[in-house]
Amino acid sequence: MGRLAIFGFQALWSPYLLATLIFITAGYFLITVKFRYRFKNSKPLTSKQAFRFLTGITLLYVVKGSPIDLMSHLVFYAHMIQSAVLYLVIPPLFITGIPGWSW
């Protein structure tokens, strides 16, 4: 048994973060697809933008909602990987995944 075996499901997988990210993703698609016509000068969502946003959401959950987050509190190496992904990978995915008309 490893160090992480002493923690429960909620500490390891963060279901509240998952629910929040699902809510944000639903809002993103409602604004950019279903209610797009309500915004002036809006353009259709491209598949690249949707893919980048979903990749950013998925990576955010993997880094902050999975056992990697708990490991980052225990092991400095995991903390540095988590920080690098949070600051260098996820923001560009979100920035390029959100359509220009919605900024």
Image (cartoon, grey):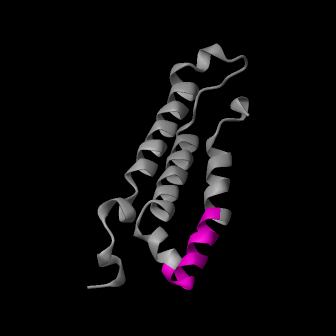
Residue lying farthest left? Answer: 1
Left or right of 89? Residue 11 is: left
Question: In this rendering, is residue 99 above or below 13?
Answer: above
Quadrant of the drawing holding the C terminus: top right
**Residue 10 location in percent, x, y?**
35, 59
Q: From the viewer's side, name the closer residue of 89 and 60.
A: 60
Residue 4 in which image quadrant? bottom left
Q: Quadrant of the N terminus?
A: bottom left
Q: Residue at x 59, y 67 (%)?
A: 85
Majority SS type along the magenta span: helix
For the point 47% across and 54% down, which residue is it? 58
Q: Could you say where residue 13 lies in the image, as x and y percent from the top left?
A: 37, 60
Q: Is residue 102 left or right of residue 62?
A: right
The relative height of residue 42 versus residue 3 in the rendered view (above or below) is above
In this rendering, the count of numbered labels is: 0
Residue extending furthest toward the top: 38
Q: Residue at x 67, y 64 (%)?
A: 87
State the residue at coordinates (73%, 20%): 41
> In this rendering, is residue 74 above or below 54?
below
| Whether residue 29 is situated above or below residue 95 in the rendered picture | above
Q: What x and y, as percent, mark residue 48?
A: 56, 44
Q: Nearer the viewer, residue 78 or 90?
A: 78
Give yes or no for residue 95 being in the magenta stretch.
no
Range of the magenta residues? 74-86
Residue 62 found in image quarter: bottom left
Question: Is 77 a magenta residue?
Answer: yes
Horizontal side, residue 25 vs residue 87: left or right = left
Q: Is 33 or 10 nearer to us in this picture?
A: 10
